[in-house]
Amino acid sequence: MLAKSQECETTTAHADSFEADLRCAELGPVVLMGSSFPSARFRRTEQMIRCSDQELYYLTLLTSGSQGLRRGRDQAETFGVGDLALIDSSTPHDVRMLGDRTPDGAGSEVTAIGIDIPQSGRVPLGGVGDQSVGVLGRAGARWGSLAG
């Protein structure tokens, strides 16, 4: 499922002890993911795009940590908890996710909710589409209870 979601180069300073939690739901053409992991860098190059472009938008809501995003050579942005970041698979990008300290103080962790959406924008409603809307609504409600 991750290969469907995003082909990229991933690096981390935590390679020897890297542990992640990933929850995925494939809802027709939409993929909903919840994840937590140590600080990491995700890079998608022009060469990767030429070899394989899934033609997706990646929408990410950070629930802990921060994100630095560089698109191309001159567009850089920083995102924090509660911010939405939108990336498309057709544009080279370099994402650095930096974790917040875990409650036990043992390390740092990034947590996020991600949604992969076809760039065509065609997400059929009915059946699976209705499930997508329901899951997204519940994810938003859960985020509201966590933030408040």
Image: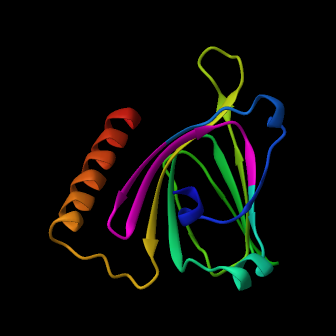
Q: Please, what is the dominant secondary structure of the magenta stretch?
A: strand
Residue 141 higher or lower than 2, as above or below: above
Q: Quadrant of the C terminus?
A: top left
* Colour convention: rainbow
Q: Residue at x 62, y 36 (%)?
A: 20
Where residue 97 appears, as percent x and y from the top left, is: 69, 48
Where residue 18 appears, as percent x and y from the top left, is: 73, 33
Where residue 29 appears, as percent x and y from the top left, is: 37, 70
Magenta span contains residue 40: yes
Number of marks present in the image shown: 0
Is residue 75 visible in the rendered image? The answer is: yes
Q: Quadrant of residue 120?
A: bottom left
Highlighted range, magenta: 23-41
Residue 119 higher or lower than 133, as above or below: below
Q: Residue at x 38, y 66 (%)?
A: 30
Q: Residue at x 37, y 42 (%)?
A: 143
Residue 53 higher or lower than 3, as above or below: below
Q: Quadrant of residue 75?
A: bottom right
Magenta span contains residue 107: no
Where residue 115 appears, as percent x and y from the top left, is: 44, 60
Residue lying at the far left of the rendered structure: 126
Is residue 72 visible in the rendered image? The answer is: no
Tell me: 80 left or right of 136.
Answer: right
Q: Quadrant of residue 38?
A: top right
Residue lying at the far top of the rendered structure: 104
Q: Residue at x 72, y 85 (%)?
A: 50
Tell me: 107 left or right of 26.
Answer: right
